[in-house]
Amino acid sequence: MEYALVTGGSRGIGKAICLRLADMGYNIIVNYMSNDDEALKTEALIKQKGVDAILMKFDVSKLEEVDAHVEKWMNDNPEKTISVLVNNAGIRKDNLMVFISPEDWHRVMDITVDGFYNVTRNIVKSMVRKRKGRIVNIVSLSGLKGMPGQTNYSASKGAIIAATKALAQEVGKRGITVNAVAPGFIKTDMTQDINEEDYKNMVPMNRFGEPEEVAGVVAFLVGKDSSYVTGQVISVNGGLYS
Amino acid sequence: MVQEEIIKTVNGFLVQEFEVEESKISSEANLRETLDLDSLDYVDLVVVIESNFGFKVKGEDFLEIHTFQDFYNYCQTKVQEKATA
């Protein structure tokens, strides 16, 4: 049985990705950190699509928590395979550089960069062994262009873009693809403090995007049609930056 | 586990997983050259070792492993460490 693990999968873009991959027939492992109610709702929606849904509550930045859940699950379920990994977990702690506290700097880096390492390492080992796998990292316009007030967030997402390109070259010969998706302004809890009316004029398509529009690109990168696409960053930003 | 058992287990999975002829395996033969290992093959080797013997392997462990005998010794030491832990 094939599973897709989506980190930060209970809400927003992660939730949309879970539901889209469930539509493709994947069983879904939903990682989340805190919001049990939303995770349970997402689990129910996935199960309505006739596939298995497993909730895994852990902090991706803590290696011991990741191993206690993901590695243990892999060891306990040798007949099941995580063939898709979507590294989506991330947080924003925006501020001008001079006002970013050490805590806010490290928390953003820990979740995004350490989280990527902690979750990906064991799973890619399994993918190498099975000669099969799709890894999609959700990055950001901020990691491509750099955004004022987001030095920590831009740095973390830029790091994952570089990691995407490096890992793609490492594991390509085993048939594993590694790509990134860079959303712009997408309507989620994470952007609820950004007024669409104030910012949509910056976007050539004159609107914010929907989480499902990001999930559609992830579905492409997971599906057969992208079998020769790896090491790429695909922007989903309404033309805001190219 | 005595070394004869280690050798039998190791040679068994190397023949099966890396498609090497058993006749080419000897204590003093070079592991990497005989198995024609590239860097990603070491990942396969790690997974096979871990699933057969149940101990964790670090990438740097391979720096000291050159011959099949080195590899047998390494596996035996790790198996003993695990048994006494």
Image (cartoon, coloured by chain):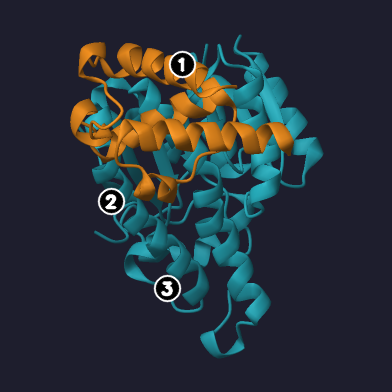
**Dividing the picture into quarters, in which one does residue A143 lie?**
bottom left
Q: For this rendering, which residue is in front, A31 or A205? A: A31
At label 3, counting other C-alpha atoms closer than 10 Å, the crowd grade (few under 14, some 14-19, many 20 or more) is: some
Q: In this view, does A10 lie above or below B44?
A: below
Label 3's element? loop
Which mark identifies residue A11? none
Instruction: Choose the circle earlier in sequence order: 3 or 2.
Output: 3
Label 2's element? helix
Residue A9, percent across and down?
61, 38
The label nearer to you, 1 versus 3, is 1
Q: How far apart are marks 2 and 1 (CA)?
A: 38 Å
Residue type at mark 1? Answer: Thr
Q: Mark 3 points at which residue?
A: A147
Residue A144, percent across and down?
33, 63
Q: For this rendering, which residue is in front, A217 or A121? A: A121
Q: Name the residue under label 2.
A: A165
Q: Mark 1 lies on which chain?
A: B
Q: For this rendering, which residue is in front, A209 or A97? A: A97
| Identity of the residue drawn at 41% across and 65% down | A142
Q: Which residue lies furthest to the right in this view?
A: A37
| Identity of the residue drawn at 42% across and 73% down | A147
Which mark identifies residue B9? 1
Relative side of A240 to A63, left or right? left
Residue type at mark 3? Answer: Met
At label 1, counting other C-alpha atoms closer than 10 Å, the crowd grade (few under 14, some 14-19, many 20 or more) is: some
Q: Do the residues labelled 3 and 2 touch (CB within 8 Å)?
A: no
Q: Which chain carries label 3?
A: A
